[in-house]
Image (cartoon, grey):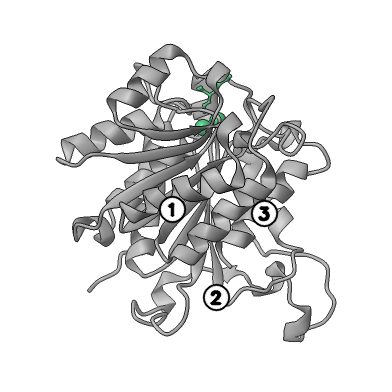
Amino acid sequence: MEISPAVADIRPTPWTGRFDGDGEQHRRWWQVVTPYTPCAESPGASEAGPRPAVVVGFRSDEGVRRNKGRTGAAAAPVAIRQALAPLAFHLDRDVFDAGDVVVEDGSLEAGQERAGRVISALLDAGKLTVLLGGGHETAFASYLGVAGSEAMRSGKRLGVLNLDAHFDLRDEPVPSSGTPFLQMARAEAAASRELKYAVVGISEPNNTRALFDTAHRLGVKYLLDEDCSAEAVREFVGRFLDTVDVLYLTIDLDVLPASVAPGVSAPAAYGVPLPVISAVCRQLAASGKLLHVDVAELNPGFDIDSRTAKVAARLVNTLLG
Ligand SMILES: N=CN[C@@H](CCC(=O)O)C(=O)O
Ligand SMILES: [Mn+2]
Ligand SMILES: [Mn+2]
């Protein structure tokens, strides 16, 4: 089968970090990640071990701007890579960087489509894809990529799990960071499917009655932030996993308490504790159902000591482990 090239708008730049030596025992992420070159690979090359992971950036502020939030998320892919680069590398898989898709002012939809095509091509080449947003409009780019992949064409049941204080089911005239999951629900309905959408960490005071009504109408499964004990979340995620063949995980960093993740557009007064979110990542990594991951809403301009970027990097590291 012909694999179309996965080419982002900006080629990856070399990763750098602390150097302790060339040996495997000294390895850090920056020493392992290499630029992704689709032409050099054959589709079946990775069948022996865990799927190689490919990181792609989605430099977008446009969704948060349209949603009247604090812009700055376009700088997040660079910040997350910088936080990942010096981490010790304990993973059992190859990791590549395919560069970034850049959303120019006003052209969100075109950027989402470009990113979607990159993700679809990588998924069809057998990769575990990691899209670094961007505001949560990143999620619709992810969805386009997943929906356009062979996994979906072959009839696999997709689940979308969102770790987020917000439903992001807004019904607006234009797409934004507040609308991606309603867009997905509509796209799935147009394809004669039903969106299986679950959210962990919903903050009741930060979602209107209208948003809860939309969630109930669409059959969305959710756990409120105040109900997110480790055990409750483990059961909730386990039940959701049982109903799907493949999972797309999206992490909106504002699911975490503001003290842990201050660098976001809408910091959470309550938030789900990091150990609980980390446990979800371990549970998903162990499930074997993870198809695609994205991390959204990091805003480096509001971060403190790169705290939020480091949490994002740590969760990505956990998910690939
Ligand atoms: N990505 C979306 N986020 C939230 C933002 C809420 C807020 O700014 O307070 C939403 O639209 O609901
Ligand atoms: Mn969100
Ligand atoms: Mn949110």
SS assignment at label 3: helix
The answer for how far apart the CA atoms under marks 3 and 1 are is: 24 Å
The image shows residue 14, relative to residue 143, as above or below, that is below
Crowdedness of circle 3 by 10 Å Cα count: few (<14), some, many (20+)? many
Name the residue located 63 percent from the left edge and 52 percent from the top edge.
278
Q: Going by the image, does 17 lie left or right of 186?
A: right
Q: Residue furthest left?
A: 192
Q: Is residue 274 left or right of residue 225?
A: right
User: On the image, numbered disc 3 is attached to which residue?
Assistant: 313
Could you tell me if the residues under marks 1 and 2 are in contact, i.e. CB atoms within 8 Å?
no
Foreground mark, 3 or 1? 1
Give SS at disc 2. loop
Q: CA distance from mark 2 to mark 3?
A: 16 Å
- Residue 79: tell me if it is visible: no
Depth check: 130 or 270 in front?
Answer: 270
Position of residue 57 measured from the top left corner of the image (x, y, whole percent): 54, 50
Q: What residue do we see at 60% from left, 47% from top?
A: 230
Residue 93 is tagged as 2
Asked if labels 1 and 3 touch by Cβ distance under 8 angstroms, the answer is no
Q: Secondary structure at mark 1?
A: helix
Q: State the mark number for residue 283.
A: none
Identity, as a three-letter code, of the amino acid under mark 2:
Arg
The residue beneath circle 1 is 238
Q: Residue at x 25, y 71 (%)?
A: 2
- Farthest residue to the top: give it: 209
Residue 143 sits above or below residue 202 on the image: below
Q: In the image, residue 48 lies at what x, y percent? A: 42, 85
Q: Residue 86: percent from the left, percent from the top?
A: 77, 63
- Please state the total of marks drawn on the protein image: 3
Which mark is first along the chain, 2 or 1? 2
